[in-house]
Amino acid sequence: TEIISLIDQWHKKGHTVLHVTHDKDEALAADRVLVLDTGTVSFDGSSDCFRKNSTLVSSLFGDDSWYIKKNEAGARLADTTVLAVENLSFSYQNYSGRGQTLPPVFSQLSFSLKKGTLTALTGPSGCGKSTLLECIAGLLAPKEGAIAADARPVLALQESEAALFETVAADDGAFGPGNNGVSGK
């Protein structure tokens, strides 16, 4: 619950948040819900519209007995786009090094986020949510497409220990810039 409180506080300060979740209550707290399914956006709309789509809700969470948490920040949405993903495509074959043909995680994925909004990105395990966030944060390089942001997006994982792969924390921190051609100590 501490991370949810931090997300809520960050959002109330006017920051844009893309929250990846498998939790229905967290998804409903968002202004907007994006659902990924086999690498494509299968739903993009308000949490109210999402809740009313009982077929989709049942397929993701197993039931449709939802309730709405009112989001006080919803009335202060701005028209400023702070993150735009345009025609993004990614496949792990770029990283296999063996020339294997792997299916794309997502292909021609596009969406944008407005300033001060809280958007839930949800979908079944393995559909590409974390991979998408790793591309947005610069940890993975997409095969095609563009990501435009007014500031460097930050990736905060639910289980941060699972994201650490280097012996020294600074090497983990340097991984994203290294993928973008930055070198040096």
Image (cartoon, rainbow, N blue to C red):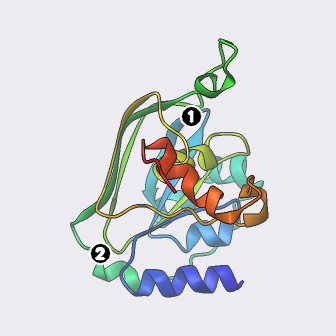
The vertical placement of 98 against 55, above or below, is above
Q: Earlier in the sequence, mark 1 or mark 2?
A: 1
Q: Residues within 10 Å of mark 2 (few under 14, many from 20)?
A: some
Q: Is residue 3 left or right of residue 49?
A: right
What's the mark number on residue 50? none
Tag 2: residue type? Leu
Front one among 53 and 22: 22
Q: Position of residue 163 (x, y in %)?
A: 72, 56
Residue picked out by circle 2? 77
Tag 1: residue type? Gly
What's the residue at 62%, 63% (across, down)?
A: 170
- Examine the rendering and report whether any part of residue 159 can be seen: no
- Quarter of the image containing the N terminus? bottom right
Tag 1 secondary structure: loop
Q: Position of residue 71 (x, y in %)?
A: 46, 82
The vertical placement of 75 against 150, above or below, is below
Q: Is residue 124 left or right of residue 147?
A: right
Which residue appears farthest toward the left when viewing the image?
Answer: 79
Tag 2 secondary structure: loop
What's the residue at 47%, 82% (across, down)?
A: 10
Q: Residues within 10 Å of mark 1 (few under 14, many from 20)?
A: many
Front one among 77 and 151: 151
What's the residue at 71%, 67% (across, down)?
A: 158
Q: Is residue 128 left or right of residue 65?
A: left
What's the residue at 39%, 61% (across, down)?
A: 152
- Examine the rendering and report whether any part of residue 122 can be seen: yes
Residue picked out by circle 1? 39
